[in-house]
Amino acid sequence: MFSIIRTLWYVLLHMFQKRVTVQYPDEKPYLAPRYRGRIVLSRDPDGGERCVACYLCAVVCPVDCIALQATEDTTGRRYPEFFRINFSRCIFCGFCEDACPTYAIQLTPDFEMGEYHRPSLVYEKEDLLINGPGKYPGYNFWRVCGVQIGGKDKGQAENEGRPVDIHSLLP
Amino acid sequence: MTSPFPILSILGILVVTLTLAAGLIWLERRLLALWQDRYGPNRVGPFGLLQVLADMIKIFFKEDWIPPFADKAVFIGAPAVIVVTVLMSFAVLPIAPGIIVTDLNVGLLFVLAMSSLGVYSVVLAGWSSDNKYALLGGLRAAAQMLSYEVFMGLSLMGVVLLAGSFNLSAIVQAQQRLWFVVPQFLGFVLFLIAGIAETRRLPFDLPEAESELIAGFHSEYSGMKFGMFFVGEYLGVVLISSLITVLFFGGWLGPVLPPIVWFLVKVMFFICFFILLRAALPRPRFDQLMSWGWKVMLPLALANLLVTGAVALAWSK
């Protein structure tokens, strides 16, 4: 009998406690910078696409929601001809971001991507590309890699030694 | 002391009680949420008050389905019975001096009789649904409401002894000096528990125990027929709260404020208490409920009546 009255009293006291509800559209919840939400393709500081179309993201994706086709421009730079993410399949696991060698594909703290039609959930490259470097501001893959592209020869990348002359005997 | 304009009184009480019953949907959801650290419905209109309207529109447009295996006539009639019997009880309830439909001199007996008739609604609903869960719910309702009715009446006899009348207005008038909750505290507790059982509210909602019997006696009901059970339940809450107010807490009596305000404040308090019970307490097992009723509450009610009678006799000497 006493325990019943005590229960009633404790439940009554809950009236004065803080609400746990987040009134969502009015009040946005805090999302950590590393929250895994909508996937974007970032650009390097010079404005070029970071993606080199290596297919690693498409391979690692457990639900096969990424589709792309590699191609090369006139300078020898690889880039995706198309890049398509089907967000009706995506499980936001972030494996693609981990697999990406050039920090091109990134997950962002944005989850408000509800749609009325499933086809609208298929994002093309122009929907995915953003106008900035995302989480890695200074990084430019083509400037640090040893690959030869137009305007940058072998050995001209940052911190790259001159190419070894394989015909010389000197060390 | 009947009202000079009976039609106005009838219409007024009808409109107010039905509005109150509908408003309770909102109030209950808000209060339950409050006690569970949530907000409850707060989007539709100011404080979510128009939620009532939205719910009503929704329930009116729901498919009103009668199962092919049901006993059609009884199935349709059952929900009406509960609303009618509860509304009939409001007819003898003195809300304020002059605001009463009919000042029956056996008002209290009339209320008890009507609440007994209310059992038919639940039992017939359970039976006509031709569904084992509904039938079990109906059986439980019959057993529970009948056994709790026994000491519900007995617990009120102390009040009747003190007031010397079955007339509800006279009972309120007899509390001018002292509310009956003080000399009849045990009677009040007994009536409160019986009242909760009569309205089939948690913690005594065994007839509809959703975790065991789906929804008990109204498993097969949908649309506005289900809505009628809902309205009947809320009207029952309002009725029991009003009865507690009238019988134990001096009805409309109170200083400064006008009588009707006092009445509504007291009724509101007990309605909130009913909702608090729902928020806080778990449901007992059915055999516990029955043995509690017959082995504890009934002897207590009889003892209360005996002692009150003895004291009243000694007083009158």
Image (cartoon, coloured by chain):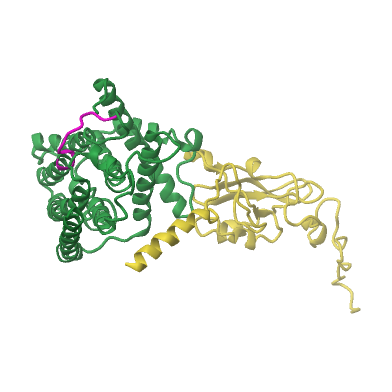
Chain colours: A yellow, B green
Q: Is residue B23 magenta?
A: no
Q: Is residue A75 left or right of residue B96?
A: right
Position in image of residue B26 (x %, y %): 40, 40
**Quarter of the image where the C terminus of chain B is located:** bottom left
Q: Which residue is drawn at 45% across and 37% down?
A: B256
Q: Main secondary structure of the magenta part?
A: loop
B163 horizontally vs B38: left or right: left
At 58% from the left edge and 46% from the top edge, which residue is drawn? A84
Vertical position of residue B196 compared to residue B117: above or below: below
Q: Where is residue B308 in the image (x, y as percent from the top left)?
A: 20, 57
- Please determine whether, in this image, residue B312 is positioned above or below residue A124: below
Which residue is more in the foreground, A83 or B10? B10
Which stretch did the figure color magenta? B99-109
Q: Quadrant of residue B63?
A: top left
Residue at 24 percent across and 53 percent down: it is: B191
Give percent across and percent down for residue B23: 37, 37
Residue furthest out toward the right: A170
